[in-house]
């Protein structure tokens, strides 16, 4: 299936924002493949045997989207950025529920870089990453949003730049600085937690 034009997605988002409930029904088939790609990217970072599957993550994201009446949709990039946030929240909620059941056992690990699948990237506990990202947001919201879009949504530098109305150079600079800061924070937490 050919990818929809960004203008088609934007047009439907604006119609949905304007109250056209049928626009959402027309939008979902256009964005479903990209949502599955995002969900698959998220799920391949999870532990083997994770109880949440890619399709379930997409479905839960869709259900939360339907309930999000406060979002002022801007364009396609903004839509996928919001979906990335929703997927992140779903996985964090799932990890917290699992952790509370196991009291810290079987922590969810994620890689904090663009390393291809099959290599040995550094890993961090998903909940620790979420906490560090929240601290980063308190200091620098833009860098936090760049991480969210690049890492959780899997958006390219150009798509992230479009979603945040920044230049690609600014996105790359923020991405590099944020990764360094987060890796330092996660390492500090790991050392504090093991001591």
Image: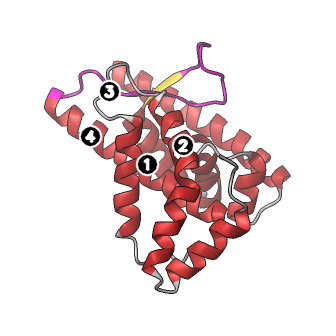
Check if mark 3's residue and mark 1's residue have beta carbons within 8 Å.
Answer: no
Check if mark 2's residue and mark 3's residue have beta carbons within 8 Å.
Answer: no
Q: Earlier in the sequence, mark 4 or mark 3?
A: 3
Horizontal and vertical percent position of residue 55? 39, 41
Which label was assigned to residue 87? 1
The extreme front residue here reads: 1
- Structural distance between the alpha carbons of marks 1 and 4: 14 Å
- Structural distance between the alpha carbons of marks 2 and 4: 21 Å
Horizontal and vertical percent position of residue 150? 64, 45
Q: Relative to 51, say whether 1 is above or below.
A: below
Dot 2 lies on which element? helix
Q: Main secondary structure of the magenta part?
A: loop
Q: Earlier in the sequence, mark 2 or mark 4?
A: 2
Check if mark 4's residue and mark 3's residue have beta carbons within 8 Å.
Answer: no
Dot 4 lies on which element? helix
Check if mark 2's residue and mark 1's residue have beta carbons within 8 Å.
Answer: yes
The stretch in magenta equals 102-122
- Structural distance between the alpha carbons of marks 3 and 1: 15 Å
Foreground pick, 99 / 149: 149
Which label was assigned to residue 38? 2
Q: Which residue is mark 3?
A: 50
Q: Residue at x 43, y 48 (%)?
A: 87
């Amino acid at each position: 299936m050919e990818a929809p034009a960004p203008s088609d997605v934007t047009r439907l988002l604006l119609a949905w924002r304007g109250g056209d409930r049928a626009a959402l029904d027309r939008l979902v088939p256009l964005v479903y493949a990209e949502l599955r790609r995002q969900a698959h990217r998220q799920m391949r970072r999870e532990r083997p045997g994770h109880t949440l599957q890619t399709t379930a993550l997409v479905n839960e994201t869709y259900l939360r989207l339907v309930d999000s009446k406060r979002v002022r949709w801007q364009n396609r990039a903004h839509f996928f950025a919001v979906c990335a946030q929703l997927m992140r929240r779903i996985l964090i909620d799932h990890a917290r529920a699992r952790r509370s059941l196991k009291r810290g056992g079987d922590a969810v690990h994620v890689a904090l870089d663009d390393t291809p699948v099959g290599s040995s990237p550094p890993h961090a506990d998903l909940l620790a990453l979420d906490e560090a990202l929240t601290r980063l947001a308190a200091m620098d919201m833009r860098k936090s949003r760049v991480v969210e879009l690049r890492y959780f949504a899997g958006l390219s530098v150009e798509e992230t730049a479009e979603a945040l109305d920044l230049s690609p150079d600014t996105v790359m600079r923020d991405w590099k600085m944020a990764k360094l800061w987060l890796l330092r924070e996660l390492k500090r937490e790991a050392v504090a937690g093991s001591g």
